[in-house]
């Protein structure tokens, strides 16, 4: 995977471009060091953020003993995991058992190579892009590499020689394959809008339209958001790790750093999906109310501002991930698969047809792809969202789980409950 990353970076360089090869190579080395240092530290401190936010939701303190306000707790956890005993249960497939955590972690780390984190910098040595590899295949690379993570989880379940781990691995493979289709389908409207698969082009398209894709392609955003939760195995889609059913699922037999790699991969995938959502649907690093950052290479203060905007959007979605975990209960497995195959996939396919048809109509009418174009799509999406939640939902997604009771039967049951309460009060007196 390291070789793949290196190859991708070398393919992205333009030796005849505005930046000479050796300054480009030095800038790439600095970007690698800075990006992945921030990435790994951020993933480590996401564990602290999860504990602190869950404690805030539940009105308690959370970690507060190691360092000021528990700030050094992730470091203590890391030292603990390094010093714990590495166990190797009998009858496991040793090679696959050791390889599986790496196969789960490396794809999550590799995807960050193609995510743009800011506007290009007009440096004294030439243009420096705030992305490690601005590949022409764009988000297709992220989908392809992210799909490799399922191999690590399946291998962990199979190589552990444990029935709970095997069931967790099989659940995860079925879940990730099912929702990858919906995720890919939800990105086709984004591709139609941008006319290009590079993430930088998608950011520029949203800036030119003066509307984010979350407003003009709301259904696609909804499908992608739900699929992103399922892809990262987070609540309410953490069926592969369901403690009440499978102990801890595919990493039941793991310990020490091999166990930690699965959690690092989960939080790394959260960070990656949060950055992808911010880029694809929320304008990415684009600075609002100005087009100066979209005109090519810009000054360093504007680069820092664009990076701060991108980071703020990513942190918001990371908070959203944690908030959902401590708010919603876990789905049943049949509900999980029904949502993916019976609702999200048909919805994504129908939405592609609607978007393509509307684009043909508006282009034939001679409407430029600017603000008016986006406002028409915004109105259509508001109508589609209303139809989806009011007419198509029918209490299966956003309503509480309950039995389909008729109104008369429900009134009779409530009457019986009230009668019992009155009898209990009289007998108590």
Image: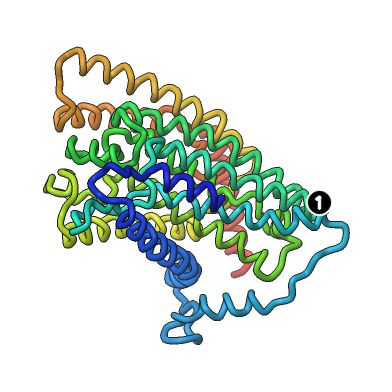
Which residue is label 1 attached to?
A: 163
At 27% across and 26% down in the image, what residue appears?
Answer: 380
**Residue 34 in the image, given as x and y percentages of width and height:** 38, 65
**Residue 101 in the image, given as x and y percentages of width and height:** 65, 57
Up the image or down, 379 lies above or below 255; here it is above
At 23% across and 51% down in the image, what residue appears?
Answer: 127
**Residue 181 in the image, given as x and y percentages of width and height:** 53, 32
Q: Nearer the viewer, residue 310 or 241?
A: 310
Q: Quadrant of residue 173?
A: top right
Q: Quadrant of residue 256?
A: bottom right
* Callout count: 1
Q: If the image is split into quadrants, where does the C terminus sit?
A: bottom right
Q: Quadrant of residue 13?
A: top left
At 45% across and 45% down in the image, what residue appears?
Answer: 8
Going by the image, does 246 lie left or right of 228? right
Q: How is the image coloured?
A: rainbow
Residue 404 in sight in this render: no
Q: Residues within 10 Å of mark 1 (few under 14, many from 20)?
A: some
Residue 170 in sight in this render: yes
Pick out the residue farthest to the top. Answer: 364
Going by the image, does 93 lie left or right of 77? right
Q: Secondary structure at mark 1?
A: helix
At 22% across and 57% down in the image, what residue appears?
Answer: 125
Q: Nearer the viewer, residue 277 or 396?
A: 277
Q: Nearer the viewer, residue 429 or 201?
A: 201
Going by the image, does 242 lie left or right of 320? right
């Amino acid at each position: 995977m390291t070789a793949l990353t290196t190859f991708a970076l070398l393919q992205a360089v333009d030796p005849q471009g505005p930046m000479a090869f050796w300054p480009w190579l030095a800038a790439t080395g600095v970007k690698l060091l800075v990006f992945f240092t921030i990435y790994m530290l951020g993933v480590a401190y996401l564990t602290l953020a999860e504990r602190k936010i869950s404690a805030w939701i539940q009105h308690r303190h959370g970690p507060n003993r190691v360092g000021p306000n528990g700030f050094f707790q992730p470091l203590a956890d890391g030292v603990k995991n390094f010093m714990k005993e590495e166990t190797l249960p009998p009858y496991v497939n040793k090679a696959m058992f050791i390889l599986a955590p790496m196969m789960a972690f490396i794809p999550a780390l590799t995807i960050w190579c193609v995510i743009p984190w800011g506007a290009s910098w007009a440096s004294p040595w030439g243009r420096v892009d705030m992305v490690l590899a601005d590949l022409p295949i764009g988000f297709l690379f992220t989908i392809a590499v992210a799909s490799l993570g399922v191999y690590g989880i399946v291998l962990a379940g199979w190589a552990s020689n444990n029935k709970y781990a095997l069931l967790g691995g099989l659940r995860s493979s079925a879940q990730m394959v099912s929702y990858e289709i919906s995720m890919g389908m939800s990105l086709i409207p984004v591709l139609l809008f941008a006319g290009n698969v590079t993430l930088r082009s998608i950011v520029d398209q949203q800036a030119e339209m003066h509307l984010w894709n979350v407003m003009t392609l709301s259904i696609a955003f909804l499908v992608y958001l739900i699929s992103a939760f399922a892809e990262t195995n987070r609540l309410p889609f953490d069926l592969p790790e369901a403690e009440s059913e499978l102990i801890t699922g595919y990493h039941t037999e793991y310990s020490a750093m091999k166990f930690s790699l699965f959690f690092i991969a989960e939080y790394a995938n959260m960070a990656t999906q949060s950055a992808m959502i911010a880029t694809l649907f929320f304008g990415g690093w684009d600075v609002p109310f100005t087009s100066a950052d979209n005109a090519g290479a810009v000054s360093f203060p504007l680069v820092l501002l664009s990076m701060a905007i991108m980071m703020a959007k990513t942190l918001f979605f990371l908070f959203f991930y944690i908030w959902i975990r401590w708010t919603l209960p876990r789905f049943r497995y049949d509900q999980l698969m029904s949502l993916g195959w019976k609702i999200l996939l048909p919805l994504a396919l129908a939405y592609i047809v609607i978007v393509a048809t509307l684009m043909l109509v508006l282009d034939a009418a001679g409407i430029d792809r600017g603000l008016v174009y986006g406002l028409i799509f915004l109105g259509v999406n508001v109508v589609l969202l209303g139809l989806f939640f009011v007419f198509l939902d029918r209490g299966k997604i956003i309503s509480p789980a309950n039995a389909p009771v008729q109104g008369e039967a429900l009134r009779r049951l409530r009457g019986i409950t009230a009668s019992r309460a009155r009898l209990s009060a009289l007998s108590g007196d």
